[in-house]
Structures are given as structure tokens and as C-alpha cells.
DNA sequence: TTTTAAAGTGTTATCGGTAACAGAAATCGA
DNA sequence: TCGATTTCTGTTACCGATAACACTTTAAAA
């Protein structure tokens, strides 16, 4: 294995100089830097992470806490995870996965927390290391999330422009900031257009949204669009509308939210608001690493825009000029 | 932070003794062991992984290579991953995730490889550390997988017993051992019962199986069961049969395979063969760690049984005595 | 030109463990 | 009983990096 020492010898400098070239290059003359770079290249030097960690009193580990049940969760975690993992990789950091079933808070340099609810506040508070939350929250943790409100504003505007007379919002019945933000986005645009709001809130499962449609569709005239707070809800809505013999997108329109996997499972493919899940994962990683570097200094929040991904559940009419 | 030294002082022994209590307890008298255990307990000693790794010339890292596209893959990876991660955790190992887009083979003590196809043979061969493959293969790598053949045997037997006259197999059209094994399971039981085999192979996407049904359902009499090599294929079959106005499970039956997430998305819930994904992940982890410990010695293969999970796409008649 | 500060490089000690060897105590055989 | 093993514990060196300090050399200030 090639060590700092080997590089140092090859470049005729001390290993401290090599270490500086890596960590504080501004302290070394260009001439030596050049020599060292060449030596590193030739020897294909790879730093020993364990040694680095030990010397720095770090672990080079970030723990990811997933606090919600994954059975019932859309599969976007996988994308989040690869986003995080790829980013951490760049800085020689490893990821450790903890689920709510296995919260062995061992050693790490920082935490990323997902699926946080009020009941987890105490747990998260007990974390002694820099922490970033994936998911909007209003209790002061640094977070990364989609811009949920803007996302639904965009969807609502699109629905109006796409020619639907009535737009019904099917939200997720949880008292969480993300759910409120999405609903607010809908409300705002409806108000701005002087349209009547219709809000229903269901548990986030397709069978509930299907049941809702079965029992209530007669209350909604044709040319209504159902704006769903998740693709999962959207899935149930589509299924039942078709089951009842109506046409999508002509009789009824449906828009979902998330754009991870489920929208493609739907038939027809669901028009949805696609989140940049992997990028958000990367952002979480960067944020927590910065926080580690800056001794836990708050990094604020970061919101990502969603992308309207057209499927076959809306008409997708050309925009009126 | 509590170190070996702190424990040693508290117990009035040298730190080497403490190290031995942890790694080679048989070399230490019971008396001292007791003292050391108590000291560790009182101080809540946690070993420093980086130091351990450095001293042992290890990284305490296992890399997970996911070689297939995740967009098109069932979301079971998340379960596999938590299985692996939880197991590694027990041995103070971290996980690093590599995707086919990001194959920076850095340092690690071993590898777990998923989604391996023939084209990856060279890559996998180039890995210099103990490797375990998730997924049956016939080119000699240690692997963990479901018992695919037995799984389909079980499904076929169930289908017969459940009263369906004709059983059609819809396989995945890839030249992979798992696909062949599943098909073989079907074939074996059909032959044993003297029934006519019907095998079709499609790309693993619901829209293809739906299209297949649309174009061919008239060739299959009522009381046929479609045995699908994946839940994804099953999903398309259900959708289209219902679309065409037939009843499931009375007119037609459907059985899927995998039992991860998609079966629950289906309506009605899909009868499927549920894999023990998390357990298989844990098995991969254990296997690779053993292999590391034993300097790469082959660990053989490990097959997991699947569980028949009844949904609403079969009649689920009580077994005839 | 001399003094002083700044910049660049090397030396030493250290992070928290472990292997290899050394030494002390206990057990054994003749 | 005494040396020879065997068993147990401690000492030392080292894994590969970095921070803190020491030492030159160079540039800036007086």
C-alpha cells in the first residue's frame, strides 16, 4: 500500500509537506506542489481513511436515520440514499444506515434524519453531532426538501391551464409541514383565480383514495381534475375512475406528486411533480459535511424545485398564448 | 472519549490486557476478564473504529455495487440494504454504496455485488477483495438468493390445488440463472402433473404484460391462472384482465413473484411469493465478513425459501384433504 | 544595512488500537 | 528440588495520517 511516506520520498520532501499539499495546498510553493502531485500520480496514492480519521479525531462516518416504516413508504429512499452515498464518497465518508428498529446511535461525525415526526423530537435532540433533516420542519433543524408549496402552485396552475373546470385537492392527512405546504400551494392559486377550493385529506394509501372516489365521484362533474398530494393517492384515484368506466384524461384528470417509480407503474402514466431525490440526497450530504467542518454551525435550509412530468392522466394541451 | 487506556487504568491492568479481553478472551484469566468487563461497563467504553482499522490494516468498510438501473428495478433494494447495513453494524462495519454510474472502486475490505450480468464479469473479476454476489450465478461466485426453482414449484402446485385448469407462465425474457430457475420450477411441477406447459417471455415491465393480455387473452379459456415471474408483470396482467371486463380471481387467477411493495400496490392485492429480502441482505453481509476473516475462503451459496403470500388474485381455497 | 515579520518546510508527538516480543509466575517432569 | 515448559501479563514499536512547534529562508520595514 502506498503511504504518505512513499510519496514524500519519491518527491524528496517530508511527509508533512505531502499532507499539506492535500489539506492546505496554499501553504506550499507551486514548485513543491507540482513535485508532490506528480509523485502521487505515479504511485497512485490513495489516502488511508482510517489513519486520517484517527488523526483528526473523526470517524469519517455519517449516519442516516430512517424513522418511518419503509413498507409503506414510496421507494424514493433508494434514490435519496444513492445521492447521499455518492456525495459522501467524494470526501471519503461512509454511510451507516439506521432504521427505527435499530437505533444504535454509535459513533459518527454527523447525522441525516429522514421521516422525522414530532414523536422523534427527543431522539433527534439527543444526537450530539451535526444533524441535517431531510424534510421540511418548523422546529429549527437545518433541512433539505422540495419546495412543496411552489410545487403545488405549479400543478394547480397547470391544471387550470389544461382546461379542467374544477380542481379537487386530495391531501395526506398528517399534521406535517410538507402536507400543509402542498395544500397551501393549491389554496393560493385557487384563490388567485377566484376558484372554489375543495380539499379532502386521506391516509396515504391507494386503497383509501380509491374508496374515496368510489363513494364520491358522483359529486364531481366531468372535467374535474384531482390534484393528489402523492402518487400513491393518485394511483388509487386513477384505478377507481377507470373502474367506474370513465375516461382519463378526458372525463377526469389526475396529477400526483413525487415522481418516483409509482408514476411509471400507473396506467396511464401519471402526470406528477417529480422531485430531484438524488440531488436532495447529495445536498443533505454536503450540508452535513459542511456542518461538520464548521463545528455544527447552522447551514440554513435548501429547497428544491420540482419538475412537472407529463403523463397520460392530463390532457397536456399546448399553452395558450 | 473513553479509550482502551482509560479502561486499563480503571481495571489496573495494561491496555494490552484490555485489548485481549476484547479480541482473544481465552488468553486472559477469568479474574482479570471480570475486572475489565466491569471497567468497560462503568466507563461505557466504545472502541474507536478508526484506530482498530488502522492497526489491523483494515478499512472496516464493505462496498455494495449495484450494477443495474434502479429506475426500472423493483424497490426491494431498500430492504436488502437495510438488511446488509444492520448486520454490518454489529461488527462495526460501514457500508459504501456504488452504482453503475459511480464505480470508484476505492478501498474496502470486501464487496457485495447486485444485479450482476455477464457484461460485468470483468469488473467483478477485477475486485481484489472478498466478494459475495446477491443473485444466483453459475460462474462460481459465492452467492445468496431465493430458491427460485422451489419457489415456482410451490406456486405452481398452489395454482393447481386452487382449482385453475390451465396455468400459463409469463417469464422474464433475460438469459439469467434466476429466470431459468423460476421457469424450471414451473415446468417441473407441470410435467409431474401431466399438464400442458405454456411459457411466454416478456421484458419485465407491466405495460408489456398488459399488452400481452390485450392481444392474447382470447386464446386462454376462463379459469386460467397466469403465473408471473415478477410482481411487475403480474401488475400488468391484472390491470388488463380487469380492463377487459373479467373478474379476478374467478375468471382468471394471477400469481406474482417477489412480494416487495408492488404486490401491495396492486388491486386486488397480488398473490405472490415473498422473498426474505432483508434476511438475504444480512446473509450477504455475514458471508462477506466471514470471507474477510478467512482470507477470502469460499463460503459457498445460500438459498432462501420464499413464502406464499395470499392476495386477492387467487381463490385461496382451503386445501383438499 | 539591520531588524523584524512572514512564508515555507521539517521534526516530534500523538490519535487509539494491535502484533510481536519479553519477562514473570505457575505448572510440570525427573 | 531445580530447570524446562507453559501460561499469563506487560513493554515496545508500529499502523498512516495530522497538529503544534521549531527552524530556515525570504521579503518587508525601518
Image (spheres, coloured by chain):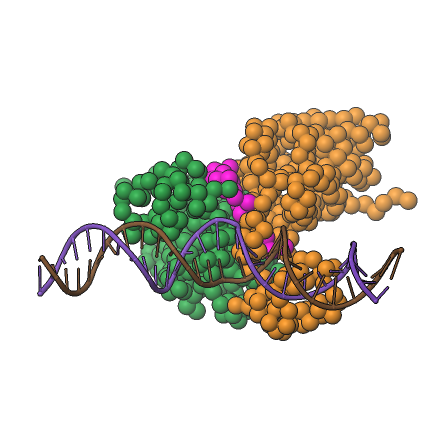
Chain colours: A green, B orange, C brown, D purple
Quick one: A137 or B53, which is closer to the camera?
B53
Residue B132 in percent (x, y) is at: 64, 40
Picture quadrant where residue B24 is located? bottom right
Residue A189 in percent (x, y) is at: 35, 56
Quadrant in which the C terminus of chain A appears: top left
Residue B127 in percent (x, y) is at: 57, 36
Q: Residue at x 64, y 72 (%)?
A: B11
The magenta segment: B91-108
Quick one: D4 or A142, which is closer to the camera?
D4
Residue B123 in percent (x, y) is at: 55, 32
Quick one: A126 or A258, which is closer to the camera?
A126
Q: Relative to residue A157, is residue B185 drawn left or right?
A: right
Q: Residue at x 64, y 45 (%)?
A: B292
Q: Label the magenta part by its dominant secondary structure.
A: loop
Q: Residue at x 59, y 43 (%)?
A: B110
Q: Is residue A131 magenta?
A: no
Quick one: B233 or B276, which is closer to the camera?
B276
Query: Quick check: B82 above or below B237?
Result: below
Q: Is residue B96 magenta?
A: yes
Q: Residue at x 47, y 65 (%)?
A: A129
Residue A157 visible in the picture: no
Amino acid at each position: 500500500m502506498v503511504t504518505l511516506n512513499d510519496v514524500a520520498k519519491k518527491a524528496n520532501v517530508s511527509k508533512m509537506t505531502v499532507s499539506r499539499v492535500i489539506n492546505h495546498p496554499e501553504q506550499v510553493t507551486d514548485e513543491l506542489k507540482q513535485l508532490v502531485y506528480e509523485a502521487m500520480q505515479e504511485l497512485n496514492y490513495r489516502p488511508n481513511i482510517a489513519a486520517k480519521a484517527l488523526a483528526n479525531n473523526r470517524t469519517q462516518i455519517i449516519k442516516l436515520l430512517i424513522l418511518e416504516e419503509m413498507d409503506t413508504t414510496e421507494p424514493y429512499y433508494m434514490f435519496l440514499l444513492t445521492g447521499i452515498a455518492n456525495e459522501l464518497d467524494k470526501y471519503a465518508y461512509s454511510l451507516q444506515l439506521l432504521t427505527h428498529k435499530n437505533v444504535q446511535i454509535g459513533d459518527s461525525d454527523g447525522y441525516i434524519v429522514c421521516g422525522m415526526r414530532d414523536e422523534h423530537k427527543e431522539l433527534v435532540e439527543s444526537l450530539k453531532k451535526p444533524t441535517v433533516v431531510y424534510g421540511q420542519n418548523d422546529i429549527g433543524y437545518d433541512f433539505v426538501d422540495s419546495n412543496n408549496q411552489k410545487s403545488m402552485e405549479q400543478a394547480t396552475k397547470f391544471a387550470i391551464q389544461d382546461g379542467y373546470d374544477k380542481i379537487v385537492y386530495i391531501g395526506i392527512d398528517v399534521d406535517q409541514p410538507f402536507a400543509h405546504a402542498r395544500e397551501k400551494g393549491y389554496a393560493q392559486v385557487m384563490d388567485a383565480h377566484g376558484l372554489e377550493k375543495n380539499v379532502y385529506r386521506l391516509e396515504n394509501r391507494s386503497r383509501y383514495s380509491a374508496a374515496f372516489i368510489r363513494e364520491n365521484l358522483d359529486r364531481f362533474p366531468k372535467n374535474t381534475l384531482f390534484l393528489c398530494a402523492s402518487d400513491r393517492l393518485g394511483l388509487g384515484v386513477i384505478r377507481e375512475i377507470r373502474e367506474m368506466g370513465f375516461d382519463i384524461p378526458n372525463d377526469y384528470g389526475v396529477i400526483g406528486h413525487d415522481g418516483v417509480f409509482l408514476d411509471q407503474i400507473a396506467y396511464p402514466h401519471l402526470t406528477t411533480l417529480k422531485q430531484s431525490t438524488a440531488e436532495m440526497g447529495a445536498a443533505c450530504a454536503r450540508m452535513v459535511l459542511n456542518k461538520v467542518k464548521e463545528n455544527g454551525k447552522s447551514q440554513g435550509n435548501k429547497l428544491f424545485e420540482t419538475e412537472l412530468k407529463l403523463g397520460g392522466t392530463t390532457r397536456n394541451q399546448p399553452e395558450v398564448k
